[in-house]
Amino acid sequence: MSDRLLTASAALAEALIEEMTRDERIFILGEDLTAHAGIFGQFKGIPEKFPGRILDTPISETCIAGCGVGAALTGMRPIVDFHFSDFVTCGMDELCNQAAKIRYMFGGQVKLPLVVWCPDGAGLRAAAQHSQSLEAWFVHTPGLKVVVPSEAADVKGLMKASIRDDNPVMFFQHKRLFRREGPVPDDPDFVIPLGKAAVKREGRDVSLFTYGSGYFLCQEAAAELAREGIEAEIVDLRTLKPLDFETVAASLRKTYRAVIVHEACLTGGFGAELAARIQAELFDFLDAPVLRVAAKDVPIPFSPPLEDFVLPRAADVVAAARSVCNR
Amino acid sequence: MAKEKERKDDRPVETKTWRAMYRTMVKIRLFETLAGEYFAAGQIPGFIHLSIGQEGSSVGVCSCLRPDDYVATTHRGHGHMIAKGADVKRMAAELFGKATGYCRGKGGSMHIADFSIGILGANGVVAGGLPLIVGAGLSIKLRRTDQVAVVFFGDGAANRGPVHEAMNLASIWKLPVLFVIENNQYASTTPQSYSCAIGDLCQRAAAYNMPGYGVDGNDVLAVRETAARAVAEARAGQGPSLIENKTYRVRGHFEGDPQKYRDAAEVQRWQAENDPLRRFEDFLRRRGVLTAKKIRRIEEEVRAELDAAVAFAKESPFPRPEEALEDLFV
């Protein structure tokens, strides 16, 4: 099957259409979904193709999330659209106390096939309450899977896997990347299994472990580093939980140097978790401290120079890579 | 009360159903009493919340339900479980933290469920069941079955935000949901008269354009009559209802609650004058549905069933510690 260029947004819609065609238990629930096919146009074609299976709700994030849980417990396979990932705070009980715990605390009696789609990330001058990257909160909650795709093909393949998974999945897709195009296999059976990282650029000198928007910073940084004679390996983690630590380990055993890159703020971010595991399990394969490149520890500010200053840049990745390579 | 009894005495006799309801009420009362005793004896870990005095609500509502209907319950959920048909052996084992319990020892009293009979779980979060039951109602509507979904919650939960979202959403989509408030007059230590801006919580139904019924929750047949109507309307696609069963929490919020917030005399008055089990028993005897002899036999049979359940729980093994790592994901 050949690849076509699709935007990340079109890749999402294609995944949903294919899966909704395959399984009539799948439906989408959220605010403002039918008038414009989602507030980002991300569900293009779905309202016409699946009337009654993409449902507009009132502004009731608590109940929308809980509704997804209740429907998943009773034979459906809901996809909950959270409008902006920032609004997960209004559904935290339903996501973290209910969805994450129900299967476990009831002794494995039931499956909970729920996908929570969260458009996240900064760079759109949307300021503090519409720009966050909150994946680490959910990684810290046992019972949830956490997926953060970067390229269009990842969006499609991982969304299909998330829908087919019988567990609750938090799916974070970066808003600024919706229109970014990438090659996507023209194959309805193209699925990327959860818990499988991808080595997207091979290199011998330093491993860049990243996910989501961080991947594109690493791409840019790797090109710059190559000009300086440093060959960076880029590992796109894609799924943070379950984490493909084997691929992380294999890369590090080759490069002996690690930089972790994410857009979420530094302190308590996923990079801290990954750095801790690397030092605990791969200490003998480290020739330098593990460095992290992340946003500064403030809310995302509005004014362009402020926002740009807070967010991680490719130059920061380059500097960190040089540092661990003693250059 | 006298007037109401007169009215009730006119209703046609449903011997088999009433006897079954009575037996279930006895079973709940005794299960709760035993749970309190074993908790006090230190044999049940954690903490437990008993529903003694609220049997009229759980049995009255669940007597209208089918096995495939859904129920979401609360931290005070033993009665709802039993009324919906749960196995008291597996319930007891769960309370004792045993591997044979409903949740293999992972849930305990506050987190019991039996999905095979539509019980979507007790809930440790007050009002946690409401958004879930709206999802169950939506699922019923999308699957085009005639099931109904019932959520029990208290006067304390009634003040939480999710209640508003859930009732509004269920109403605009006309979902087959029963919102059942068990107004037992106290949210932990706080009286309903203090915490709610209105006295009759059923009035809130008007804000959601759904029927609201205020019921004497300690009159099990009045509860049954109201629930039957709401269930029939829900099955017929006419949307949700709110039922407020006015009742009383005879025990403390949790076992061991020092209860400094109320007089012992208030509790005794409710027990003496308004015990739902005693009231139903008197009614059934007046109507000739039960005799003292039959009542004695039901009590003995229930006692034997619960003694066996407790023995099963006690004899069952604890889970292996490593089982703590199981059941997280499919």
Image (cartoon, coloured by chain):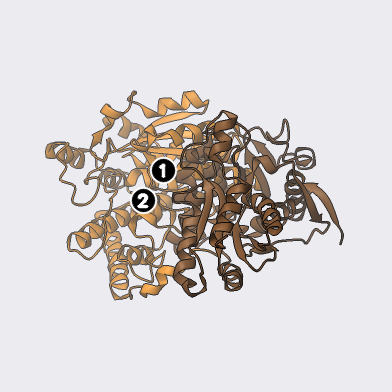
Chain colours: A brown, B orange
User: Going from the N terminus, do you reach mark 2 or mark 1 first?
Assistant: 2
Residue A322 in picture, x, y percent from top left: 58, 57
**Residue B77's disc number:** 2
Q: Is residue B115 left or right of residue B254?
A: right
* Quarter location, residue A157: bottom right
Please tell me which residue is depicted at 26% across the width and 62% down the height of the picture. Answer: B45
Q: In this rendering, does residue A12 appear at all?
A: yes
Q: Is residue A34 above or below residue B209?
A: below
Residue B90 in picture, x, y percent from top left: 38, 66
Q: What chain is tagged by disc 2?
A: B
Depth check: give the residue in front, B222 or A106: A106
Which quadrant of the figure contains the C terminus of chain A?
A: bottom right
In this view, the residue farthest toward the right is A2
Classify 10 Å Cα crowding around label 1: few (below 14), some (14-19), many (20 and above): many
Residue corresponding to mark 1: B152
Determine the secondary structure under disc 2: loop
Residue B164 in picture, x, y percent from top left: 47, 31
Question: Are circles 2 and 1 on residues that touch, CB within 8 Å?
Answer: yes
Depth check: give the residue in front, A225 or A215: A225
